[in-house]
Image: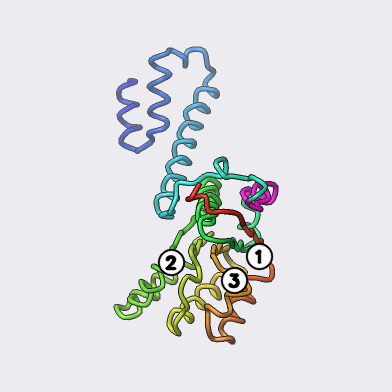
Amino acid sequence: MSSTILNKMSHMKMHGMQRMYQTMLDSHQHQDLTHDEFINTLIQSEWEDREHQKISRHIRLAKFRYGASIEELNFTASRGLDKTQVLRLAEGSFIQKKENILITGPTGVGKSYLASALGQQACQLGYRTLYFNTQKVFPKLKMMKADGSYTREISKIEKYDLLILDDFGLAPFDNTARMILLEIIEDRHGRKSTIISSQLPVAKWYEVIGDSTVADAILDRMVHTAHRLELKGESLRKK
């Protein structure tokens, strides 16, 4: 009977429940449990297994630059990183409220790592997250305009709970990239959250975006109610 049950659990892909049932059989633990406790233990194991799989899938699909975590962040005073603010953001309320985060600072101070850590934490909380290097994604999206897959990709980006645009503003936007950025920000405004990291202070973003009318439209939606994290100090890569 036990072998049959284990086989059926495996066939139905109830792997968490299968492992727990096998463990309980091996240890004879089930003999000390009531029927309700026994069923609850099996269901809890299956639920935890599926949650773990979902989180792993979110992290894999996000394609983060770093395998970062909030616990490993460096909060030394010289970096200007407010631990209380970061831990509060890590709770995920900014995603629930559809708010944005802007991370700025000189090269090497850990902007990408911080963005990835917040993204990883979002995945742990069950939010679908997508990470892009800005310098790579816009050429890719421009090519998609040519082959007809652009609309589908933009629609996919819009649905993610959290979008991370890393290394923003390393090169000026041309007209096509500028309008793509506007479409992404417009689609997500008030509906989803976005994290942008950049070496440039926010005041310089107008210049790098280019067209003043488009820049106003983008930054009006991104900046005014965003959480700001301004890192400083020497490059951590040098250290």
Could you tell me how far apart the alpha carbons at marks 2 and 1 are, in whole angstroms? 23 Å
Type of the residue with mark 1? Ala
Return the residue at label 1: 226
Local crowd size for mark 1, using a 10 Å CA cut-off: few (<14), some (14–19), many (≥20): some
Q: Viewer-nearest of labels 2 and 1?
A: 1
Q: Secondary structure at mark 1?
A: loop
Local crowd size for mark 3, using a 10 Å CA cut-off: few (<14), some (14–19), many (≥20): some
Q: Position of residue 116 (x, y in %)?
A: 50, 53
Local crowd size for mark 2, using a 10 Å CA cut-off: few (<14), some (14–19), many (≥20): few
Color encoding of the figure? rainbow
Q: Position of residue 173 (x, y in %)?
A: 47, 79
Return the residue at label 3: 189
Q: Secondary structure at mark 3?
A: loop
Magenta residues (range): 79-91
Task: Name the residue located 52 percent from the left edge and 21 percent from the top edge.
Answer: 35
From what the image shows, is residue 121 above or below residue 190? Answer: above
Closest to the observer: 239 or 85? Answer: 239
Q: Main secondary structure of the magenta part?
A: helix
Type of the residue with mark 3? His
Task: Name the residue located 65 percent from the left edge and 61 percent from the top edge.
Answer: 228
Could you tell me how far apart the alpha carbons at marks 1 and 3 are, in whole angstroms? 11 Å
Counting the numbered discs, the total is: 3
Return the residue at label 2: 156
Closest to the observer: 179 or 136? Answer: 136
Q: Is residue 154 left or right of residue 109?
A: left
Does 195 appear in magenta? Answer: no
